[in-house]
Each structure stands twice: as structure tokens, then as C-alpha cells.
Image: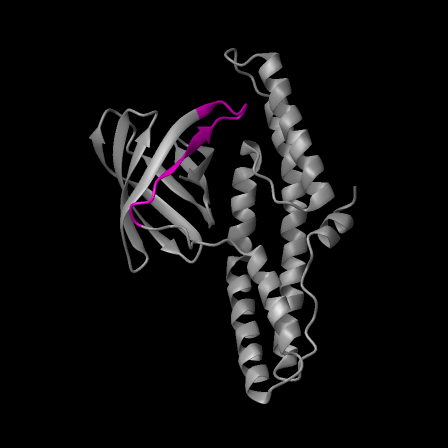
Amino acid sequence: MSILFLIAVYCLLPLSSTPSDVDKLNQLVQQYNEMNRKELAQMLQAFDQSEKAVKELQDKAVTEAQKNTSMQLIRNEKKRFVETGRLPEVANIIIPRIQYHRSLFEIQNKLLEAYQQELDAAQKAKSPTLATLTRQRDELLSQMPSSSEFKAKTTWKGYRYNLVQRRYLYEFTPTTIENGKFSGVLTTAGKTQLEVEGTVTGSLIQFSIVKVISGSSSPEQNFSGVLQGNRMLLKLQMGGVDYPTLLYLQ
């Protein structure tokens, strides 16, 4: 299946035909579509790279059956991604997906601002293009991650994964959120409790451990990722290794 078909399925944004500041808006649309093509192509390559990494894994604790199961999950997710354009959530591709969202974050927000300016102008002029602009703006919003569910006292549960998708339980509760900064409690494997602090910028999130409350754990753990509605996609950096982590709002 070609990457061109994948891009068509994923619905890149059409150019605007509105008269107000149309060149600026269309330029941003073209830049966004080009970046989207590039990032989607890189994500497609990540499937093959992840499958190769599992295949070449040298670990006596991992059986061939476990490796084969993990590789099949990667192949199945790749097939779905190519056929539907739905962004992957299989553990091995979480980190490439985070990179996809982070790469598009700035231009998506610039484009959203440009659409809002066009909408304001169209409303003021009572332009017949208002409905088209609204539809294009909403299409862009549907492609953007959202932090709307990230609130104080919410509970997020999920897992950190290794290369063959062995799972390690994690639970996170932000206790306070103010002016883009937050603190919270992270519980690992139901035993160790860690105090964390971090920041949220739009849909981008990052936090690190500031204190071990109970149990024992390495304090050198740093999380970064993206908020996707009721899901939190994270990259955990620990001991020089990046671990995909996926948490769900409870």
C-alpha cells in the first residue's frame, strides 16, 4: 500500500477560497499538509523499524513465541494504519506517534489561529464562505490532540511497556494544576508512590519525579508526551532507555 493512499485516507486539509488574507492561510495549509505527509511517512517506517528491533532482540528471558506475538501485533497495527489512516496505539509505535504530534504542534496552532482570523472576517462581512471555513477549522481540530480531560483529581491508569510489550502497571493523579504547571502522585506496580511535577503546554505534557513518597524507585525518571483526550501517550526515559507508556482516564 503506498504512502500516497495513506495520506489521502487521512484527509489533509483543502485550500481555502476565502478572500480575506487568503494567501497567508493557504500558505499555512500547504506547509501543514507537507509536514503531515513527511511525518506520516516517518511513522510508517517506524513500524518496520520496530518489528526489526523485536526480531533482533537478544534476551534469554524473552521467548521466540513472545517475539513472534509482538511482531504480529506490529504488522496488524501497520495494516490498519495504512488502510484507515487511524493513528497507531500499539505499544511499539507510541513513541513515534508522540513525535508525530510534537512535530505538528506549532504549525497546527498557527493554522488554527489563521482559521479563526478568517472566520472572524467572514462573520463580520457576512460572507457565504463562513460554513466552508467552519468545516475546515473543525476538520483541523479533529486532527489535533486535546488536553480538555486533564484536570486536577482525575485518575489515569495504564502501563509502561518493554520491547515485547510486557506490561508494568502505572497510575497517575494530578493533584494541582495552575497556570500550566502541575503536581501529582505516580504509583508504579501498585506499591511505589512518587511525587511528580511538570508542565502542560496545549496538549503537550512533561513531568519528572521530585520525591519518593513510599517504596523504592529510581528518581531519574522523566516523562514527556501528548494528551489525546482520555488517553495520555508518554515516553518514559529511565536508565538511558525510552519506554512507551499509555495511560487512560478512569
Q: Quadrant of the C terminus?
A: top left
Work out whether 222 lies above or below 70.
below
Left or right, residue 183 beside residue 17: left
Q: Quadrant of the N terminus?
A: top right
Magenta part of the protein: which range?
152-167
Colouring convention used in this rendered image of the protein: one colour
Closer to the camera in the image, 99 or 118: 118
- Residue visible at 56% across and 32% down? 92
Instruction: Name the quadrant containing residue 128.
Output: bottom right
Work out whether 5 lies above or below 212.
below
Instruction: Name the quadrant containing residue 225.
Output: top left
Left or right, residue 199 beside residue 195: right
In the image, residue 74 lies at what x, y percent?
A: 64, 30
In the image, residue 226 lies at what x, y percent?
A: 46, 48
- Residue visible at 67% across and 66% down? 30
Total marks shown come to 0
Instruction: Name the quadrant containing residue 121.
Output: bottom right
Work out whether 28 lies above or below 194.
below
Closer to the camera in the image, 181 or 154: 154
Asked whether 131 falls inside the magenta stretch, the response is no
Closer to the camera in the image, 55 or 131: 131
Left or right, residue 214 beside residue 2: left
Q: Hey, which residue is sitting farthest bottom in the picture? A: 125
In the image, residue 113 lies at what x, y percent?
A: 51, 71
In the image, residue 19 lies at what x, y percent?
A: 66, 84
- Residue visible at 63% across and 33% down? 49
